[in-house]
Amino acid sequence: MLKLWKDFWRGVWDDNTIFRLQIGMCPTLAVTTSAQNGLAMGLATTFVLVCASAMVSLVRKLVPKEVRIPVYVVIIATFVTIVDLFLKAGFPDIHAVLGIFIPLIVVNCVILARAEAFASKMPVHRAIADALGMGIGFLVALLTLGSIREILGMGTWFGMQVMPASFVPWSIMVLPPGAFITLGFVVAAVNLISRQSAASSQSS
Amino acid sequence: MGKSLRMVIVMTVTAMLSGLVLSQAYETANIHIQRNQEEELRLVILEVLPGAETYEVLVPEAQTTIPEDDITLSEAPPTQQRIPVYRGLDKNREEVGLAFIVENPGYGGLIRLIAGVDTKSDTLTQIRILEHKETPGLGSKVADAPFREQFSGKSVSDPFVVGQDVNGVSGATVSSKAVTEGLRTTIQEVMKRYGKRG
Amino acid sequence: MDENTQLIVSTAPHLRDEDSVSMIMYSVVWALMPATLSAVFFFRGRAVAIILTCIITAMLAEALAQRVRGVPITLWEGSALVTGLLLGLNLPPTVPLWMAALGTGVAIVVGKQVFGGLGHNPFNPALVGRAFLLAAFPVYMTSWIAPFDAVSASTPLAQGAGGIYSYGHLYLGLVPGSLGETSAFALLLGALYLLYREYIDWRIPAGYLGTVAVISLLAGQDPLFQLLSGGLMLGALFMATDMVTTPITRAGRWLFGIGAGVILMVIRLWGAMPEGVTYSILLMNGVTPLLNRWTRPRIFGHGGVKDNG
């Protein structure tokens, strides 16, 4: 059980895709204009990550290593298409905003990387724990960025007015430069926290 | 030999399973997707035809079967093969006007818009840009109120020429002309077929 | 943190001397005094409040950022004071004070300290702050009032040449605009002092202003009007001449000035905005390392391409 928790927590914090590995930046910077978009993109990616990792782990002994990458890509693309259709059918508004970035989950390097580096060598339950951790780490990062940008850039959070009426929205935050500025500050904060926790665990 | 055969089998089975799953998912989702699109169309038709409670389809959007009274544009360019036309009805099922979809290439791609005509006064009620790929901040202004609203109240027999009776968006002549000329050609066809005085 | 404080990285031609840094900085402050006084004269209490807000915020942000970074606090070398003062002079007189403070904070923290403090920042910090404010609050950053009476008015550039302002108005600064940018006379007076002390190089303003004049002539615009209006004088004399963010070679400085002039005129003539001094200098700041490398003097005594060929 502890092993599973470690697999999970590594993705959420120690090897967080956005804050630590800094991969999968394209959707991160592009769609985090609001908390809702960040959450939706994070959920979509987590779903694909978990399903694809589980599937890759299940078939890991059947697939010859020469064709493993094409097989993984087909598996990932299948789940991405399902998510795309599901959003289009159930949440057309969100689909209209996320648009091209949903199909682009296929090429999010996190997913193929976890399939290749972890799921293809591990039993299903560990693959799922790892994918869940990675996905939730990604989701938390996107939700954080989307929330900060929406609150400062529009004065709202999930569409609800959270800033006082006298607040003047900083429109730069919902523009592309705002994505980079916010990401920089959040990564700095995460580094600060982990450095302090490392220092305190060392001294204790 | 055995190895490459295994590779072929694995790839084939993977692709087949994926195809099977996706076709099922598509079948299920497509019902909802179409319903969403219809609902969107309904809202926008009722928006451009004030007073309408419901509508009936006179010319549907492109489908496999072509109805008899299909409109084909006589004027070049023949980018729009057919004009989808909808008749707006009030609660007594009396006609309040016609809504139709105009497609004309602009600067960055096809501009798709819906226009409403009040058939009692033969004037345009409103236009709404549905889709466009014009330059943001420049050509995209054809979708904004200042440009769009000058068509409200225009008579269908107006000339519809940028610089004469229509003020173009400055710096975006191509986009302004695409909207105006697309309206001019389609209005004439629609009024000829379905207008009360046509 | 320890391993960072021991590493002091510096590129070859930089000589560092704390005394001369603060001497240069305070000279710049003195050189900006005529423009500051003209701002106070034209825009009264608003100018005082905005400039003081910017300076105080700049000092606080500098001290705070240096404390968080764990480096010695070098508040009295004056570079934060210069950044705050320059940004204040670059703001419209009607801008709310909290906005001025926010922009200054961004200028010091994002524009300077995150790169490693003075000498390491690739972009002019005051202009980073101004660009941030311009993108964040475009309405506030482009509303102007006429000098003396607080009546809203449009800038000479927005009106275009042949507006109601004469060359005399433009030269003295009797026009709507940012606090310190309006008076060409006051700015030139300060810049002459810096030129005399040899703290700024005449090549950058000459290249910048010359290019603007030439392109104006070619485009059929009034060159004198283009030179005197907007933030060009303030930018060309005090911000395009910043030692840290501009090339160190003479040829590089010419290219920097010319490039900034071309970008400015492209924005003024064909862009959606009436003014582009901020972006022209920031963009050229971005290519400064390339200009330095491109115009690096050949080492004496080494065979060049010609000799080998």
Image (cartoon, coloured by chain):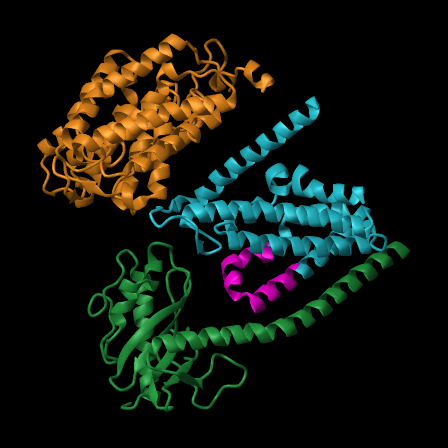
Chain colours: A cyan, B green, C orange
Q: Give the answer, above or below, for where B9 lies relative to C295.
A: below
Q: Nearer the viewer, residue B87 or C233?
A: B87
Q: Nearer the viewer, residue B51 or B68?
A: B51
Residue A93: % across, % down:
50, 64
- Among the 4 quarters of the image, the one containing residue C37: top left
Q: In the image, what residue occupies the spot 45% across and 75% down?
A: B41
- Among the 4 quarters of the image, the one containing residue A50: bottom right
Q: For residue A86: magenta?
A: yes
Q: In the image, what residue occupies the spot 37% across and 35% down?
A: C102
Q: In the image, what residue occupies the spot 46% across and 73% down?
A: B40
The quarter in which the N terminus of chain C is drawn is top right
Q: In the image, what residue occupies the spot 28% across and 38% down?
A: C96
Residue A163 shown left or right of residue B174 in the figure:
right
Which residue is most to the right?
A: B2
Q: How many marks?
A: 0
Residue A119 visible within the image: yes
Q: Nearer the viewer, residue C178 or C151?
A: C151
- The overriding secondary structure of the stretch rendered in magenta is helix
Residue A149 shown left or right of residue B152 in the figure:
right
Q: Give the answer, above or below, for where C48 lies relative to C153.
A: above
Residue A147: % across, % down:
50, 48
Q: Give the answer, above or below, for where C134 lies relative to B157.
A: above
Residue B23: % across, % down:
68, 71
Residue C61: % across, % down:
40, 26
Residue A109 visible within the image: no
**Residue range of the region highlighted in magenta in the rendering:** A80-104
Q: For residue C249: magenta?
A: no
